[in-house]
Amino acid sequence: MPRPNLKLAPRSKPGATHLDSGAASSASLDGWVWAERISVVGLFILAAGYALFVVQDLFVPVVTAWVMGAILRPIAESTERFGVPKGLAVIATATVALLTLLAIVGLLSTPLAYWISHTQELAVLIKGKLQLLNQPLAIFDEITHALSGVSGGPASASPVHYDTSTIINGIVSTLTPVITQFVLFFFAMIFWMLYANKVKDGIARLFSDERARQVARKVLNEAENKVSQYFGTLVVVNLCLAGVAMGLASAVGLPNPLLWAVLAGTLNFIPYLGPAVMVATLFLIGLLTFPTLKGAFVAPLIWIFVTTLEGQFITPTIIGHRHTLNPFLVFLSIAFWAWMWGPLGAFLAVPMVISAVVLKRHLSSYSAVSTS
């Protein structure tokens, strides 16, 4: 009689169940540890972001002073080689840079104030030029009419009495923070140019490990050098763009070519956002200057071609592909810091990206050496 083919289940080893359960609990524990770490890091980032937003009146002037100091310090050091004392060289360089900035602001403030004071007239003229958009724009008139009907019509005009003390208090309350931040920026820039090496040594001494001190010093030096090289190159490029903008304004018949040169050279320090504002401004002024819509498009289209050529080919070639930043990362940084700190935040976005890239590279190399 044939024997039945019986297969016996493999006998489990003693303690296997305990090992499996231990491995599962260990994996579960590792998951909770990582979740805890991510939560702590996320809370720290939120707290740091909130602190940067709340105390922006302090951080923005100081960070701007560091950027301007990194740009101007090589100029001051080159002046010292001619026998000029360090303090005098720093103060003279900072003063010349300040006067240049004030001259740029002065050139741009007069037409800007004129456009702001004539906003309604300019809006009527632009609306009349955009005949193709008359139907879509008519909806705003209907909305205004409907809202005035709901509110019971226009309110009767009543004499307005202005209190002189209230006006003075408003002016003082507006100018006081601006003046305070400006003074903080100017003196922080001078002190950084005078004592940058001592400040870097003090930051490096905060680390107990000698190798960590060396890495911190390298990060600070390289970040400053990269920012200085980037903006030094950008100054030369923007001066050339200012000349192109002046020639373009003269060629197409836009008023005040010098104004367009200053505006183009200034706005191009902010990637993406600056050229976009320049194109929009050229289009709006073209609508007010030229009789046809076709003529208003000439200058903006040419400027789009010029800035695309500069941003995608000329500047990366001069700086070098080794120093070229990720365009998407730069765009996100500009969007974030413009939201956080306003126009100055957009200007400071690229230096922050450069510093973050330098810090990441040195930390990666430090970690690789430490683990090997």
Image (tube, rainbow, N blue to C red):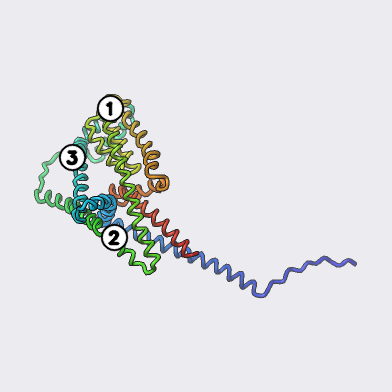
The residue closer to the viewer here, 217 or 38, is 217
- Residue 333: x percent and y percent? 36, 49
Camera sees residue 193: yes
Res. 49 image quadrant: bottom left
Residue at left 27%, top 56%?
59
Mark 2 or 3, nearer chain start? 3
Count numbered badges in the picture: 3
Mark 1 or 2, nearer chain start? 2
Res. 42 image quadrant: bottom left
Res. 20 image quadrant: bottom right
Q: How crowded is mark 2: few (under 14 residues within 10 Å), some or many (20 or more)?
A: some
Where, quadrant-wise, is the N terminus in this rendering? bottom right
Residue with the mark numbered 3: 155
Residue with the mark numbered 1: 251
Mark 1 or 3, nearer chain start? 3
Residue with the mark numbered 2: 197
